[in-house]
Image: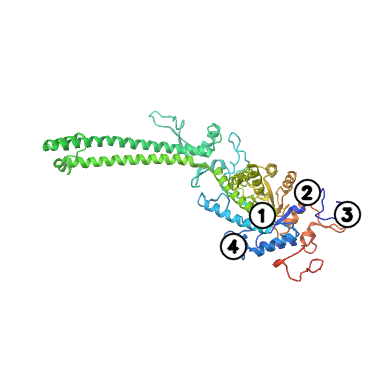
Amino acid sequence: MDMESDYWNALDKSKSMRVDPNQIGISHGVGDVGEGLKANVFRGAKVVELGFMGGGKGSRSQAGKHTPESYGTREREEMRELAKINEMEVSTHASPNIGYAAGFSPQQGVFSPEMRENVLHEVERAIDFAADVGQGGPVVMHIGEFSRPMFDIERDKQGKPITPFEHFPDEYKKAPILMVDKDNGRVQALRRDMALSIPKGGWEKPELDKEGNVKFESKTIAQLEKEAYEGGKLKQGEDVGTYLYKNLIKRELEFAKGEQQRYQTQADEVRDTYEQLKRRRENLEDFKQRNPEKARYDAVVMAEQMKIAPDKDSPDYKKFIDNPFDFLKKREDRVLYEVQAFETIARSRAAEVHTQQQQVERMQPIVEYGVKKSAETIARAAMGAYEQEKAKHLEKPLWIAPENWTPEEYGAHPAEYRKIIVESRNEMANQLVRQRGMDREEANKVAQEHIKGTFDIGHANFWYKYFKGSKKEFDQWLNKEVEKLTKDGIIGHVHLSDNFGYHDEHLSPGEGNVPMEKFVEKLKESGYTGKLIAEPGGQKEGRYHQAMTEAWKLFGSPMYRIDATSQSWTDIESSYFGRAPQPPNFIVGDYAPSKDWTLWSEVPLE
């Protein structure tokens, strides 16, 4: 293309064009998706992402309450036709306000199967919509699975944290170690700043003082964690949380075992007394038949010898003398009760030991447990998308596109993001093999086609506020992480928005400090052919389209020109409808402004 000629168009190919503008689309924003689609037809968009903010029962009267089910068959058909005749591609975004795939409830501190099922149903609603309107394509869902310490995301082989992030000062001293009971999903937290009394020399061989008492010292969980790594006490592949939890429970187990043994010993001793008392009383009862007086006398002597007789000054002493056999029987019954009580306590302590041992076996690191649950949910959603794709003979694959979200929650870090997607693909492949009898190689391929990540570069940028370094160093870190993701084929869909590294402000591309150009260069180098969706939200009212036009500008797309007069992008953005480079082809159904509407050429529609 000759850039000096009198004619050039944004769709012409050029060596200077870094991104094909047909790859760059726009999200419709918040509110009615039909109206959003229509508005973006006028804006010249070739790719539009329709998203929802509502969950559960929807409401068309409130912008934040729209759900996929708010739109019936006729409206879906009109949107599908509108996109088709204007040669537009439509992707779908499930509501970000429905919870996350792992089903974690921070209020209850538990991973809930009911919550996972609710999330799945909401994503399935978006899948239905995407099948009807988009005829396939990505269905985006946020992943922000559960809280976890930032400093602990990555460690080297010696256990030293290597992630250059910190949620708050001295996080490594204070953040909890999180474990999950895999039977009920309940989270247990070991606070790193919690101080414990630990025997000097360890539990196995504690040091003793001159009196033979155990010497104790106070240590925090963080100190014990550091010692475990530096001392090489962790077994291969063992999580530090599991190690510390086992060692802390070990102290309670030792106490419970000691209590069990103590009460069992007491029970045995008292049972000996009981057996002796019972035997001697029964012998005296037999002797009583032959010599009552001598037997009564022997019973009194026996009770006094065994030191169980009441005190002579006691009002019960006379009753004892008058009928020692009755006293001995009652005493025997009381001793038997003591035996039973001690044995009951001993069994209770034994049950505690068993319960705690079982609990130790059930505990898992939160990442291990949570990622498994996330993968199961995402894989089930992808299986549903695959089934719909086949049943409805869709034009293109219908797939699930998990999106990185906020740094405070698992799944936002590129390493976590990769792990969730890889594990979800593995789980889907397993389901395809089990449920469909599919060959493993084919199952892996299908899973990779139906679970691909949506990478939001704007979301990735607000990791910067927790970064221990300069913005330049942060951008270098992020570029390296993106390179890994693109190399491994993790990214299949992209969101573009800008910010200054603090939160999701959705500025137009180029308006903040997101390293967006380098990001897109990495995508292009990797051979990425997916779409790049510019997400509006931080523009002036009526200027939402700038999210897309600024992206066109930033990535080297020339604007339309038909004479030698140079025009600026501001001209196009600020007066788009008066000088639009390409009007919509057709507007149909209820989305048509009026029945006598004409095209820009004033030729009426027939």
Quote the CA–CA distance across marks 2 and 1: 25 Å
Residue 232: percent from left, percent from top: 54, 31
Q: Earlier in the sequence, mark 1 or mark 4?
A: 4
Circle 3 sits on which residue?
5
Residue 437: percent from left, percent from top: 60, 45
Q: Is residue 481 above or below residue 37?
A: above
Disc 2 residue type (three-letter): Arg
Residue 187: percent from left, percent from top: 50, 46
Residue 97 visible: no
Quote the CA–CA distance across marks 1 and 4: 25 Å
Quote the CA–CA distance across marks 3 and 2: 20 Å
Q: Which numbered mark, 4 or 3, is in the foreground of this view?
A: 4
Circle 2 sits on which residue?
18
Local SS, label 2: loop
Q: Earlier in the sequence, mark 1 or mark 3?
A: 3
Disc 4 residue type (three-letter): Gly
Circle 1 sits on which residue?
505
- x 30%, y 35%: residue: 268
